[in-house]
Amino acid sequence: MLLFKGKTYAEVLTTIHAQCFTKPWKEDQFTSLLDLPSTFGFIDEKGFILCSDLGQDIEILTLAVLPEFRRKGLASALLNFVQKLMKIQNKKSLFLEVNCTNEAAIALYKKNGFQPNGTRKNYYHENGATFDALCFIWQNPSDLIDEQES
Ligand SMILES: CC(C)(COP(=O)(O)OP(=O)(O)OC[C@H]1O[C@@H](n2cnc3c(N)ncnc32)[C@H](O)[C@@H]1OP(=O)(O)O)[C@@H](O)C(=O)NCCC(=O)NCCS
């Protein structure tokens, strides 16, 4: 697993993303995101996670594992790398939005310690239909301990 910043993996991310989403992002969308100093991720050849560092908090921009490598713990490992980095860097929370119909991702986030944190109505638009986004958040336990002590 490799921690990355910058545009080196733009093409690889685009290729993996295209195999994982019905509305894949174009390479120039990845390039624009990767141009931002706040963007970072973890990657191996089977999947990746892309995040935005917002200072105290981290947002998951996207997460994808190639279909033939799913249910082997890779997405959990990618999440855990971000969570470990956040503990080292003393970040507060990790958050994301997920389509309310994405049962696999919802189960993944719940299994990895994320809590529901609201709903964004009609957030996703696909083929003329709209879907709510469910918001999830993971609080860095080290940060919660600091808050209780202060
Ligand atoms: C969601 C996704 C990233 C999960 O990747 P993964 O590597 O298969 O996930 P893991 O193997 O770490 O799964 C961990 C847990 O999540 C849950 N889970 C994962 N896929 C699931 C599925 N298809 N159905 C039900 N639960 C699922 C299970 O609880 C699983 O634990 P288990 O295998 O011991 O039962 C992958 O399915 C994917 O890339 N999907 C398309 C893109 C996407 O939806 N990304 C997330 C957008 S927010």
Image (cartoon, rainbow, N blue to C red):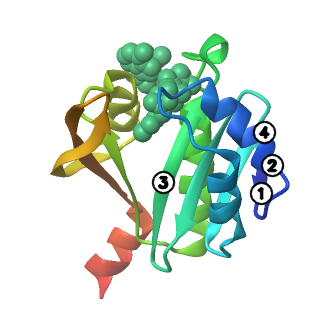
Q: Which mark is residue 60?
A: 3
Q: Distance between the Cα atoms at labels 3 and 4?
A: 18 Å
Amino acid found under the numbered disc labelled 2: Tyr
Q: Quadrant of the C terminus?
A: bottom left
Q: Sequence order check: which comes first, mark 3 or mark 4?
A: 4
Q: Residue at x 21, y 36 (%)?
A: 131
Q: Residue at x 44, y 67 (%)?
A: 142
According to the picture, the residue beneath numbered tag 2 turns out to be 9
Asked if the residue under mark 4 is in contact with the one under mark 3, i.e. CB atoms within 8 Å, the reply is no
| Front residue of this view, candidates 75 and 16 | 16
Q: As displayed, is residue 90 above or below residue 132?
A: below
According to the picture, the residue beneath numbered tag 4 turns out to be 12
> What secondary structure is found at the residue carrying circle 1?
strand
According to the picture, the residue beneath numbered tag 1 turns out to be 4
Q: Residue at x 48, y 54 (%)?
A: 60
Location of residue 1 in the rendering, given as x and y in whole percent from the top left corner = 77, 42
Location of residue 45 in the rendering, given as x and y in whole percent from the top left corner = 79, 31
Asked if the residue under mark 2 is in contact with the one under mark 4, i.e. CB atoms within 8 Å, the reply is yes
Q: Residues within 10 Å of mark 2 (few under 14, many from 20)?
A: some
| Front residue of this view, candidates 146 and 113 | 113
Q: Is mark 1 within 8 Å of ligand 1?
A: no
